[in-house]
Amino acid sequence: MKNQANVLFIVIDQLRADCIFGALAQQIKIPNLTALMEDAVTFKSHYSVANPCGPSRASLLTGQYAMNHRSVRNGTPLAAGTDNIATQMRQLSYEPMLFGYTDTSLDPRALHANDPAIRTYEQVLPGFVEKLEMRQEESYPWRSHIARQGYPTRDYATFYHPQTPSGASPRIDDPAFYKAQDSDSAFLTQQTLNELSVRQQQNWFAHVTYIRPPPPLVAPAPYNSMYRNSDLPDPLRRANRSDEAQCHPFLATHLEVIKDKSVVDGPFANCDKDDLETARSLRSVYLGLVSEVDQQVGRLVDFLKSTGQYDSTLIVLTADHAEMLGDHHMWGKQTIYDSAVHVPLIIRDPRQQQTHGSTVNAFTESVDIMPTILQWADSSFAIPSSVDGHSLAAFLQGHTPENWREHIFYELDFAEPGAPTLWQQQLDLSLEQANVAVLRDRQYKLVHFNGNLPALLFDIQADPAEMCNLATDPSYQTVLLQMSQKMLNHRMSNANSSLSEMRVTASGTVNYRNG
């Protein structure tokens, strides 16, 4: 083995890039993430290639686009035997430790029909050792911890209800019933530290996944009221929901889909998220949760420093996808706007201190992280042919690779087998047609819908908030065609090549990617 050391791979659920650098970052308290950026390389044009959680993490951990791994929805199985970061790190003699979750739907062909593992999409990616189970709906170790601390027993349905102080009127930003020291984020961090504290004499690979800051939006004190609504920038949106709906049939249906979906539990579950003051309150709680996670990341970094492991550990911090947070009157992530897919990426390579504190503006994608970690662990390791991403090692060394990508690509499937979604019903789309692909370069962004739905085209330079659709403008038809050709070329060039780069010869099978 060559160049082996520790790897700390942190994924923060549903974290927007502009919480780290951008409009929201001007107001939020994230001292630990800021300190890490000053001692690492920050990738400012980094994008998730799929959402929601299951597909995005499948791409992140396999290095494949959704069009290739095909685990395109929460609950859609990932094929057994798919190469992933955990199985590959095992080949480098690492035990892949998971603290949290991967939201993997396992291949039923590899399991008995009665196996409970195929009754939830919140399973563990093969290859990982689940050191701590922290799945949102089955966080039994944390809930057991809460009970041991003497908190009243609650079922899952009421676990995230805000707790109104005695004698006060309910507020949307009331705190959680548990203290910050006992939160899910704090518990996850402590269990990770407990495990790593006895592994200081060996190389380790830890994948740590925080389930915050996404809904249900409830934060323990003091994070629930850390930010004043009046200090925060408002959501980027049109005047009203009707104006948003007129932009495209998919978006009109999307606004219906999310209309009754709650982002906070308890008495405000049915709050009017279009009301600006309500949206501001929800955004402030979200930012409070980000600050809470920041503190926990700081604990991990402090541990590495205090144990002398900071300069022998590759730190990779990113998000699975982002969050609309009221932009375009939308919440969640299953849509086509940048707010849902632009995520932070911070990498500290202890071997490349000359680039610490620098930023990279080149386009990078979530599929790039797996090959980056593998190459860092062993520079001679053969990256699997199935991987669509490319190592970011050159950027960490201070230069841009030749012929680096000039666009990013991401996908969204909005169908549901056996239970057609509202999109399928209202837009008359089959299971195979209810999907969209997006290609974005420095100036333009093409949103191509299947099923003969009209395209969307945005001039990102002139219209960064994506308010003006140019696809029907006669003067932009050449641009529309050029972007469509780019997307077709991208898809054709990135078809699954697990076997197509091999050749059977008289001397045996040769993999021409790896020689």
Image (spheres, rainbow, N blue to C red):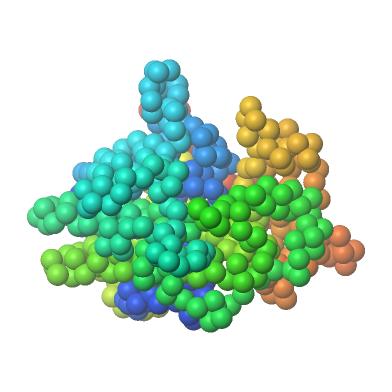
Residue 122, x across and y down, in percent: 42, 39
Describe residue 364's horizontal placement relative to residue 220 as left or right: right
Q: Kindly identify the residue that appears in the image at 43 percent across and 62 percent down.
A: 164
Q: Is residue 358 visible?
A: yes
Q: Quadrant of the C terminus?
A: top left
- In the image, is 311 to the left or to the right of 81? left
Residue nearest the observer in this picture, 178 or 81: 178
Q: Residue at x 76, y 70 (%)?
A: 239
Residue 192 in the image: x percent, y percent?
A: 23, 54
Residue 397, image x, y percentages: 36, 70
In front of the other: 225 or 336 = 225
Residue furthest toward the right? 474
- Direction top: furthest residue: 113
Q: Is residue 97 visible?
A: no
User: At x 19% / y 66%, what residue is drawn?
Assistant: 303
- Between 141 and 332, the residue placed more toward the observer is 141
Residue that lies at the very extreme toward the front in this rendered image: 167
Q: Is residue 87 above or below residue 440?
A: above
Q: Is residue 91 above or below residue 262?
A: above
The residue depicted at 31 percent of the width and 38 percent of the height is 127
Q: Position of residue 46 (x, y in %)?
A: 51, 64
Q: How many marks?
A: 0
Between 112 and 443, the residue placed more toward the observer is 112
